[in-house]
Image (tube, helix red, strand yellow):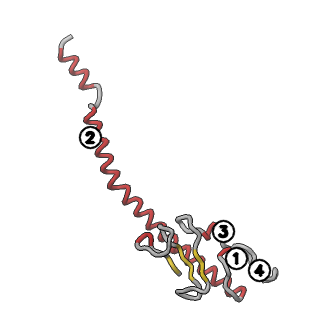
Amino acid sequence: MDGRSSRRGREAGGFTFVEILVVVIIIGVLAAMIVPQFFGQTGKAKVAAARQQVATLSMAIGIFEQQYGRFPETLEELTVKPEDVPDELWMPPTVKPKHLIDPWGTPFEYRQPGEHGIFDLMSFGADKQEGGEGLDADIID
């Protein structure tokens, strides 16, 4: 056996540790650049979904008020027959309990009377607390 054939066998055998390490580092750098952008888009999508849910629930509250002559005391009244509503006036709810939860898994806050209008309906955003900016900003109707 000569020295050439054994060297050629090592070269054809695969990648060196350094080459693999370089590839892993490149993948890590790319992931560090891409992942935050992906999560930023997910956050924006959740904000848009929360805005839509707030608008839909606000309409349901308005319909409830028109049907029954009063605002619901709680959001849960949108999902079940209120005790003070006669059977002949009751309309089956179109709001399901799962609709009362924002995209971050937190129940919507409902206040009647409200500070911003006749009632306030809000999601506290990604941070799940009142106040905040950006993705943490409250969504209020």
Q: Is residue 56 left or right of residue 21?
A: right
Front residue of this view, candidates 80 and 52: 80
Q: Is tag 4's residue or tag 1's residue first in the polypeptide sequence?
A: 1
Tell me where residue 34 appears, x and y as whole percent. 35, 55
Q: Quadrant of the N terminus?
A: top left
Q: Residue at x 37, y 60 (%)?
A: 37
User: Which residue is most to the top?
Assistant: 1
Identify the residue position indicated by label 3 in the image: 97
> What is the quadrant of residue 77 in the picture?
bottom right
Q: Residue at x 35, y 51 (%)?
A: 31
Q: Is tag 1's residue or tag 2's residue first in the polypeptide sequence?
A: 2
Q: Residue at x 31, y 42 (%)?
A: 24
Q: Is tag 4's residue or tag 3's residue first in the polypeptide sequence?
A: 4
User: Which residue is most to the left?
Assistant: 3
Q: Residue at x 77, y 80 (%)?
A: 90
Identify the residue position indicated by label 2 in the image: 22
Tell me where residue 93 appears, x and y as whole percent. 70, 74
Identify the residue position indicated by label 4 in the image: 90
Please, what secondary structure does the residue beneath circle 2 have? Answer: helix
Task: Verify CB contact (< 8 Å) between mark 4 and mark 1.
Answer: no
Q: Select label 4 or label 2 by which is in front.
A: 2
